[in-house]
Image: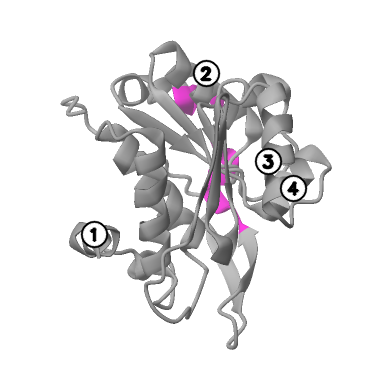
Amino acid sequence: KEAGVTPHAFRDPKSYTGAAMIFVDDASGDNAIIISSGAAAFITLADIWSWAEIIDTASVFVTQLEQPLEAAHAALSRARAAGVTTILNTAPAREIADSMIALCDYMTPNETEAGGLTGLTVDSLDGARAAGDALLRRGAGTALITLGERGALLHMRGLSEHVPAFDAGPVVDTTGAGDAFNGGLAVALAEGRKPLDAVRFAAATAAISVTRPGAAKAMPQRGEIEALLNG
């Protein structure tokens, strides 16, 4: 929503912008990432309170796990209290308390993260559904498990729907796929799309991103996403 507020930047003169060392398999485009959080590691509860107006006036709030868990937990709690739709991208993989999971309208783990959170093997749709059930029992509103080239599973009470991956061309680099997926999901939900339509939008966004090298520079434009959805 247009809130008329000025975004805040977190700056720490003793630290640095977060960085990642990314290794990409030339044959498959799969990646392994080593993350150094930098200044994000020093975000405090006071910072969350200083950004309260921005959180309160959002349509959708998205966070991940590169900052301290207590900061992510507090921000999710603030968003939930304001009636804002909450998305938790569970990367990088960490243990999460049930009290934090219960604040998530959507959790978006990949197969590895879903397995780590539930102790289950997630190498099939049945495994993903079992992990989804486990996350719902822990309080998640929706478990949205990304399955790489197999697409994603939208798993919520009363609905478990597999969304196949889109074919946007040869896979070059999967580094930004998770970011693209979560960004696309947030946009679609903020626009009022139903969950299944939002997941399809997110999947199309991610499908285009993996056809290009890098992360930020691989993000597609809306016209490209709509063309793939309607193609």
Q: Amino acid at mark 1?
A: Asn
How packed is label 1: few (under 14 Cα within 10 Å), some, or many (20 or more)? few
Q: Amino acid at mark 4?
A: Gly
Q: Which residue is mark 1?
A: 230
- Sequence-wise, the earlier of marks 1 and 3 is 3
**How far is mark 2 from mark 3, CA to CA?**
27 Å
How packed is label 2: few (under 14 Cα within 10 Å), some, or many (20 or more)? some
Instruction: Name the outermost residue toward the bottom.
Output: 27
Q: Considering depth in this image, is 57 or 140 the residue closer to the camera?
A: 140
Quadrant of the drawing holding the N terminus? top left
Question: Going by the image, does 109 lie left or right of 63?
Answer: right
How packed is label 4: few (under 14 Cα within 10 Å), some, or many (20 or more)? some
Give the number of the disc on residue 77. Answer: 2
Residue 161: percent from left, percent from top = 53, 42
Q: Are marks 4 and 3 in contact (CB under 8 Å)?
A: yes
**How far is mark 2 from mark 4, CA to CA?**
30 Å
Q: Is residue 208 visible?
A: yes
Q: Which residue is mark 4?
A: 127
Relative to residue 224, is residue 29 depicted above or below? below
Please give the name of the residue rendered at 34% of the width and 70% of the height, measured from the top-left corner.
217
**How far is mark 1 from mark 2, CA to CA?**
37 Å
Please give the name of the residue rendered at 33% of the width and 35% of the height, measured from the top-left corner.
189
Q: Is residue 8 visible?
A: no
Residues drawn in magenta: 36-48
- Which marked residue is nearer to the observer: mark 1 or mark 2? 1
Residue 115: percent from left, percent from top = 76, 47
Residue 194: percent from left, percent from top = 34, 33
Relative to residue 100, is residue 161 depicted above or below? below
Give the number of the disc on residue 129. Answer: 3
